[in-house]
Image: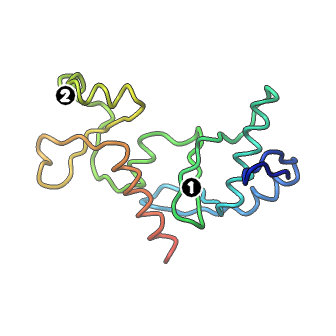
């Protein structure tokens, strides 16, 4: 493993395997999520970047890690969908389809174009007609639920 300006740059296959072995699963609302110690996640991210530079496929996606706290990172690879994330976040009832009229409003459209996404949630006092729940709120709830499950 090489370091450049505090960043891990070169990772061997053996180092990636050792980092992978440090993972553990946390089940939240019936959905299983994979958690890594931060150091191991950083090694896997560097491994994924190295494979991408070589034009090879890696089972890890460098941008698929979500920081839970200073010690742990959640891996959300290609096997996780919005449904899985919403279930883990404890959204109750939700729909990945959002009303077209709401979506086309200038403020919402600009957020969506910037990479943000929303689901339509039916929980709380606005449960009859639902309300938009942005990705940031979904992930905030997911982090809270996973950290809570890890403490048990």
In this view, the residue farthest toward the front is 5
The residue lying at 88 percent from left, 53 percent from top is 14
- Residue denoted by label 1: 74
**At x 73% / y 49%, what residue is drawn?**
44
Q: Secondary structure at mark 1?
A: strand
Which of pointers 1 and 2 lies earlier in the amino acid sequence?
Answer: 1
Looking at the picture, the colour scheme in use is rainbow
Q: Position of residue 83 (x, y in %)?
A: 41, 42
Residue at the image point whose x is 17% and y is 23% from the top = 101
- Residue 102, labelled with which disc? 2
Q: State the image quarter where residue 89 is shown.
A: bottom left
In x, y percent, where is residue 98?
A: 26, 31
The picture places residue 90, in percent across and down from the top left corner, at: 35, 56
For mark 2, does the 10 Å Cα neighbourhood hold few (<14), some (14 to 19), or many (20 or more) residues? Answer: few
Q: Nearer the viewer, residue 8 or 98?
A: 8
Left or right position of 150 against 47: left
**Real-space CA distance between mark 1 and mark 2, rounded to the nearest whole angstrom:** 31 Å
Between 89 and 40, the one nearer to me in the picture: 40
In-image side of 76 versus 49 (left or right): left
């Amino acid at each position: 493993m090489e370091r450049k300006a505090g960043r891990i740059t070169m990772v061997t296959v053996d180092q990636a395997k050792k980092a992978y072995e440090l993972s553990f699963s946390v089940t939240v609302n019936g959905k299983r999520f994979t958690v890594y110690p931060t150091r191991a996640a950083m090694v896997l991210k560097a491994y994924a970047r190295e494979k991408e530079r070589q034009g090879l496929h890696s089972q890890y996606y460098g941008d698929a890690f979500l920081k839970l706290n200073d010690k742990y990172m959640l891996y959300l690879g290609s096997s996780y969908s919005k449904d899985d994330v919403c279930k883990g976040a404890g959204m109750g009832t939700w729909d990945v389809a959002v009303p077209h009229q709401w979506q086309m409003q200038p403020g919402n459209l600009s957020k969506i174009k910037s990479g943000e996404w929303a689901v339509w949630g039916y929980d709380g006092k606005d449960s009859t007609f639902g309300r938009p729940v942005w990705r940031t709120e979904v992930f905030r709830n997911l982090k809270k639920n996973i950290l809570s499950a890890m403490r048990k």
